[in-house]
Amino acid sequence: MSRLNRLSNRFVQHSQLHENWSATISDYVIDLAWSPDGRYIAAASVLGPVTIFEGRHQAVIRTFEGHEFGTMSIAWHPDSKVLASAGQDGKIRLWDITSGEATHSLDGGAAWVEHLAWSGGEKPILASAAGRKLKLWNAVGDLVREYPDHQSTISDIQWKPRERQLASITYGGVALWDPQQSEAVRRLEWKGSALVIAWSPDGKHIATGDQDSTVHFWIMSTGEDLQMYGYPTKVKELSWDATSRFLATGGGLDVTVWDCSGRGPAGTKPIPLSGHRDFISVVRFQHSGKLLVSGGADGLVYVWELQGRRSSRVVHEATLTAGVTNLVWSPNDQYIAVGDELGGVSVFSIS
Amino acid sequence: MNTAILNNQVPVTVLTGFLGSGKTTLLNRILTENHGKRIAVIENEFGEIGVDNDLVIGAEEEIFEMNNGCICCTVRGDLIRILGNLMKRRDKFDYIMVETTGLADPGPVAQTFFMDTEMQEKLQLDSVTTVVDAKHIWQHIDDSDEAREQIAFADVILLNKIDLVTEGELDQLEARIRNMNSAAKIYRTKNAVVEMEKILNVGGFDLDRAMEVDPQFMEPEYPFEWAGIYNLSAGTHELVLQEGPDPAMKLALVPVNESTDEALEAAVEPVVMVFSDDEHELSAGGTLQPSGQLIELNLTADELRFDAQIDRTGAYALFTEHHPDEFQAQLFGSGALVKPVVEREFKPDHEHDDEVTSVGITTPGDLNADRLNDWIGDLLRTKGPDIFRMKGILSIKGESNRFVFQGVHMLFDGRPDRPWGSEERYNSLIFIGRNLDRTELTEGFEACLA
């Protein structure tokens, strides 16, 4: 334990995070999303219901019934007026925040719809992944495109930052899709099971966290790839900082940060951030700032300041009564919303 | 702390068996008889047959290869996803049943519970239970890797549809299965009717119960399956057989002192030696004598009658390679049926030359930990793909606690168990796999003794 607490003990001057409010939803917070305008927090329970909270104080604006058998993910339309949800009933639903009504119920194409992602830009497109099916929808529920089935279940999707290109991952690698074309525009093959994808904000790298306890880097300009070994468990937690220099990863008790500047991360030693006492469940850099927040199954939330190998430190911390399942920064980077295994939703401020 | 975590683990039974074996009947029975419990069912042949339960989840049998250092193995990606999601709910399930397709290799399913930390933490693989169609398995057992693997991986085997076969056929099937997997518990069922405690919470993958296996596999193996002592009067007797599963059968007839269990026991060792001699072939109509010779009856004729010439009234022991029931063998003296006074069944050795077998090793003494590590490491590296299951209990020199372990292919899980205390220290382990070399394994293991 002494080794684990090395960094947090050396710098004891960190403060407790200030809790603005907290509330409880029906069960495990399976997804949590701050509306792009910063007004609302949507929290989805693994049982199904989706609760919309006021961001600044504890007030429930709406409760949507979500999905029978359970909701799996939620995603805000960039205009913050529509929330999309996906669930174990095979449906994608669009909810109107103003009226509180479900405006559309769409067929994902498999028993479970697991992932959703809105594109940016004019007339945003919603991508849905259900089993091997990848579909694109517009904001009024029209099917824009259905791609040919993937080789195996799609484990994650993400739009390229600032561009209309979608990346999907499966066992077997990454595929890139253009909404204007019916076939994949590029494939990055790798015989392994990727679980999560994170595109660097500058679009130059794609990182995946993998089932076999590795992190994979793809350098998009050349198609070269690197694999980072040595994680104690599968890696489901990835986050790039705003400058695209640092990639924070979970996959164990330590947060491991790779520096991609210069020739990195190839041949470099990552920065380990120690302090958690159980597996890390989420890592998130601020949207534009330098702070990194991590949450773990131990219920601990640490806010880290990254200053290099020796001088990175915890600046704030909070302790929850249940394991952290999700963390999101408010769009202005001043607040952190946290969800936990028992349905707790809390908002902390860092100033 | 570990106890609390363990108590929260949800048990999982993996149900395998060929299509039509009675898997779904068993599943429905489990759901009906455990009414009120929350049982989640993960099915591969989703939609084909209705299972009467709300919590049925279809799975796609996605097999992922995983590379972890020097270990390469396959896991079920779909199960990791589905089970991971189920375990997030606060109102946890009481039990999870994973039904595999008829043609599934149980290896990836079992390995999933070793290779994924989340699965290891939250779930306890309770057993692999295999349902065997007692009538139709013969069509598969010789030419289907999957059928053999399903038997080899099993902790529990149901010989189902016993109403469609004879007792003799069942005995023969059970002997064959025992030979492949001597650690499994075998139950004979009709319509998959079996007491629930025999298939649920049996702890087949539980290290604490790793060695609570049928002690039969510790028994030595014999070249014969059956022996009986007859009281025979002087004269000619007739041994009559019917067509059976094999074209020939070895036997030996020897005089013994009296018709008691003790006399039979005393004859076993000498007759084992007889069975290692060259056999004398005897065709139908031929005469056999209580000579202590190894006879091989040729069983290819239409009429399978053999004379037995007895010169002196007394007790005689007959040792047969196969169970006499398999050939409906009967002995007649002066036209009347003669029944054995005492009889005994023996665990057969490799009568069928199956490529899938079990090797059990039991030996007293302490092990040298370093040598054992090297040996196991090397064994798993070179023979891992052929070792389906292994489990055991070990006595390591200098350690006051028992060490228990189990493995699936190259994956190995072991830990110290309770102290030996005053109990005599010993080692006992079993390997179930393909093309196992008994001598090599036994010698390799014994070389690890300190």
Image (cartoon, helix red, strand yellow):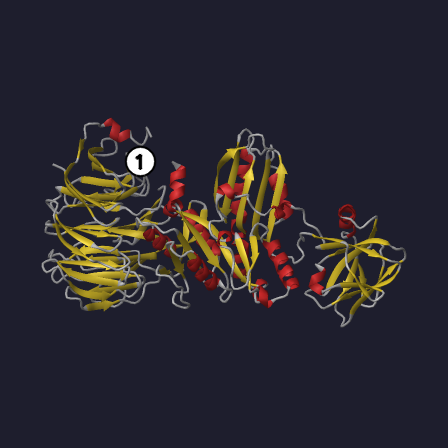
Q: Is residue A314 above or below residue A197?
A: above
Where is residue B57? Give x, y as percent.
36, 60
Amino acid type at image mark 1: Arg
Count of marks, rendered view: 1
Q: Can residue B226 be seen?
A: yes
Q: Chain of mark 1?
A: A
Residue displayed at 72% across by 60% down: B324
**In which quadrant of the rendered view does residue A334 lie?**
top left
Q: Is residue B393 above or below residue B103?
A: above
Where is residue A32? Give x, y as percent.
20, 50
Mark 1, residue position: A277
- The image quadrant where one finds the C terminus of chain B is top right
Where is residue A152? Give x, y as percent.
35, 61
Q: Is residue A19 left or right of residue B446?
A: left
Q: Is residue A331 left or right of residue B253?
A: left
Where is residue A299? Give x, y as percent.
26, 39
Q: Is residue B221 above or below residue B400?
A: below
Residue displayed at 59% across by 68% down: B164
Q: Can residue A306 be seen?
A: no
Q: Residue furthest bottom?
A: B302
Q: Is residue B226 left or right of residue B157?
A: right
Label 1 Cα crowd, 10 Å radius (few <14 / some 14-19 / many 20+): some
- The image quadrant where one finds the N terminus of chain B is top left
Residue displayed at 29% across by 51% down: A196
- Considering depth in this image, is B382 or B284 the residue closer to the camera? B284
Q: Is residue B428 left or right of residue A184?
A: right
- Considering depth in this image, is A82 or A346 the residue closer to the camera? A346
SS of the residue under disc 1 = loop
